[in-house]
Every structure is written in C-alpha cells, then in structure tokens.
Image (tube, grey):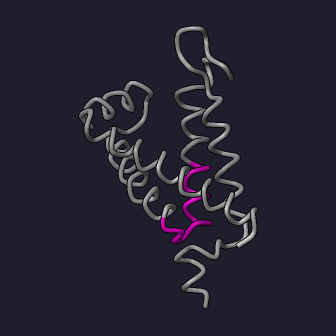
Amino acid sequence: MTKQQWASLIVRVVFGFMFFYHGVVKFQGGIEYIVGYFESLGLMGGLAYVIAIVELVGGLLLILGLGTRIIGAIFVIIMIGAIFTAKLSLGLFGDGTYAGYELEVVYVALGIYFMIADRSPISVDEKLAK
C-alpha cells in the first residue's frame, strides 16, 4: 500500500468511528432528549432515531470500508442538514458559548472525499470488487 492509501485508511476509520460514537452517545444519553431537541428545531422527533441509527450503522460500515461512497454521501446530507437546522445561526466558529458549524464543514469535506476517493485495498468494498 502507498502512503496515500494508508492515510486514506486512517482517515476513513477515524471518520467512521466519530459517527459511530455520535450514534452511541445519542442512545446512551437518552434518545428522548435528542427527540425533544429535534422537535425544538421544528423537525420530526422520530428523525432522531433515524439519524442515530444511520450514525451507528454508517460509522461501522465506514470503518469496514463497505459502501464507503454511499455512506460518505449520506453523512454529507446529514451534516448539511445539521448546519442549516441547528448551527447556522451560531456562525462558522460559534458565538463564544456554543460551537459553530466548523466541525460539520470538516465532516462535509471528508464525506465528499470518500464519495470520490478510490477504494482502499484494505476495505470490504475492494474485496467485493474483486
């Protein structure tokens, strides 16, 4: 494997873990609080379950390198949704009390990267392609 492939693998695993962990936290902290937060934003509360499950499952799939392009695209959509529903009013770097949407922008960029990047030699996607 090349240095670029190793770097991509590391970033994919870390990116996947971050989403997986966000999904875990949503359930551990009490999904009903997330449901309430979504409703306070004018969203359907049930969407909290969908997002939490997508983060859990999508994060695991990304770690494995299975459906990487699709998961990357789904994470881009989720992060753009988060920016426009929850974070935009705080500004890019926040208001001094709350974080802005800078992390979501990084996640959008990473999602786009995985939408267009070559398959990693160490991924389920690559094994299935052969």
Q: Residue furthest top?
A: 96
Q: How many marks?
A: 0
Q: Nearer the viewer, residue 69 or 89?
A: 69
Q: Is residue 41 above or below residue 115?
A: above
Q: Give the x, y percent position of residue 29.
A: 27, 33
Q: Give the x, y percent position of residue 88.
A: 62, 25
Q: Is residue 21 magenta?
A: no
Q: Main secondary structure of the magenta part?
A: helix
Tell me which residue sits at (31%, 28%) in the image: 36
Q: Is residue 62 above or below residue 24?
A: below
Give left or right: position of 123 versus 57: right
Q: Give the x, y percent position of residue 65.
A: 54, 68
Give left or right: position of 8 versus 41: right
- What quarter of the picture does the N terminus occupy? bottom right
Q: Which residues are the magenta region? A: 64-77
- Residue 128 image-quadrant placement: bottom right
Tell me which residue sits at (48%, 45%) in the image: 18
- Residue 84 image-quadrant placement: top right
Q: Is residue 125 above or below residue 7?
A: below
Tell me which residue sits at (37%, 27%) in the image: 37
Tell me which residue sits at (61%, 91%) in the image: 130
Q: Give the x, y percent position of residue 21.
A: 40, 44
Q: Is residue 74 magenta?
A: yes
Give left or right: position of 31 versus 11: left
